[in-house]
Each structure stands twice: as structure tokens, then as C-alpha cells.
Image (tube, rainbow, N blue to C red):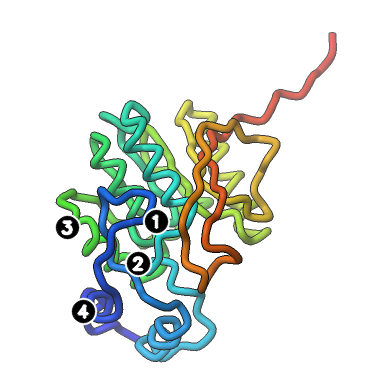
Amino acid sequence: MKIPDPDAFVRAETRTRPVPLVPEITLRVADEAVPLWSKTEEELAEAGLPPPFWAFAWAGGQALARFLLDHPDEARGRRVLDLGSGSGLVAIAAMKAGAASALAADVDRFALAAIGVNAAANGVSVEISGADLIGGARPTVDLVTVGDLFYERGLAARLLAWLDGFLADGVPVLIGDPGRYYLPGERLQTLETYQVPVTRDLEDAEIKKTTVWRLMPTAPADGGS
């Protein structure tokens, strides 16, 4: 079913608020998850949709955004891919940190509208892709950011295999995550840890300890002498 005006839906069902850990950035966010979830299904005449990830500032994204603003050298002058961008928070932070460009990728059609609305509200230009990039051709970028995507086994496996291609090409990957179950812990180098305010509607606590990691390549097999 075609969405008549996704921008209007995003604006009607959310309100502008500063991001708790990153008050320099404002986002259109929802007050409650479940009512918006129901309205999304009604708007698309489709049941069983995933939660409206785009309407909230998730812990991993907040941590990544804070990290990029506090460490602008990580993004400055680089072409950044923010995967599973949701609200566009991390892509916006990358541009504010001086990135040459930021590509915000998300498969949720409402997220694409939210990213555009939020980027404009924060005075930055962000490229937007609605394609499922994981497993396909890798965009030409200099940095990849991934927030809160290691929550499902199959997705995590596909994602990690795809990210390894970037590492093989010398492209760094930063991950922001509060410790989702399928996070590849043995592959991660800790950069910063934050106490992140989040919505109790979607999390099990009001504050989530969240870390920004650098994804490390797999160690080469020891072939012996």
C-alpha cells in the first residue's frame, strides 16, 4: 500500500525533543511506543510490523552520536555509512562532526521520512537509502557506524559477515550497543562507555549502560611453522 505522505505522518505522530545524551541534536520522537506501533500498522494496512525504531533515540545511537561529537576526528572529512539509521541520529552527528557525507540506510519506509525531517531540522544534509544493503555490494565509504543492530541471531550473523568486508578494505566500523544478546563481544575494542537515558516503553531500565566499540578483524588462523 502506498503511503500518501510519510513526512506528514512522522510530523503528526511525534514531537521535537532534544536527545538526552546529545542535547545538541533534536529529533522527532514519539511519547509512547505501542500507540504509534498500532497507528503505523493502520497506516500501512499491515499487521505484524516491527516496532517504530525510527521514533525513538535508542541507546546505541545516542552513544555513537555522543562519541562522534566528542571525537570529531573519527568522522571529519570522511564518507560515513550509518546502517539501520532509524531516526538518522548518528548520521546527523557525523555531519555535525565534520563528515564529508553521511549515508543513512534503513529499510523502514517511515524511517526514511524521519531521517529527512530530522536532518533538515538540525541543519545538515544527509543522503538516504531504503535498500537492504546487508549482504549486497558495499557502498564506497570511509567509516561505518552500527547502532543497536545485534538483537536477532540471523541478522547479526549476516551483518557481521558483511561488516568484515569493510574491515578487509581498511574501513573502520564503530558499534554502539548496550549489550544486545548477539553482539560479537570477542571482536570488540572498547572506546567509550556511557550511561544513556532511554524510554522505558522499549527497554528494561530507564538508564542503559552503553558502549561504543571498534569492531576488530578476525585473527588470522595460525598455520604453524
Are circles 3 and 2 on residues that touch, CB within 8 Å? no
Position of residue 113 measured from the top left corner of the image (x, y, whole percent)? 27, 68
Q: Earlier in the sequence, mark 3 or mark 4?
A: 4
Q: Earlier in the sequence, mark 2 or mark 1?
A: 1
Residue 39 sits in quarter? bottom left
For disc 2, the marked residue is 111
The amino acid type of the residue labelled 4 equals Ala
Question: How many residues crowd mark 1 within 10 Å: few (<14), some (14–19), many (20+)?
Answer: many
Q: Residue at x 39, y 48 (%)?
A: 82
Q: Earlier in the sequence, mark 3 or mark 2?
A: 2
Question: How many residues crowd mark 2 within 10 Å: few (<14), some (14–19), many (20+)?
Answer: many
Q: Secondary structure at mark 4?
A: helix
For disc 1, the marked residue is 85
Q: CA distance from mark 2 to mark 1?
A: 8 Å
Position of residue 79 measured from the top left corner of the image (x, y, whole percent)? 31, 36
The amino acid type of the residue labelled 1 equals Ser
Q: Secondary structure at mark 3?
A: helix
Query: Observer-nearest residue: 223 or 51?
Result: 51
For disc 4, the marked residue is 8
Are circles 2 and 1 on residues that touch, CB within 8 Å? yes
Query: Observer-nearest residue: 207 or 171?
Result: 207
Question: How many residues crowd mark 4 within 10 Å: few (<14), some (14–19), many (20+)?
Answer: few
Question: How many residues crowd mark 3 within 10 Å: few (<14), some (14–19), many (20+)?
Answer: few
For disc 3, the marked residue is 120
Quadrant occupied by the C terminus:
top right
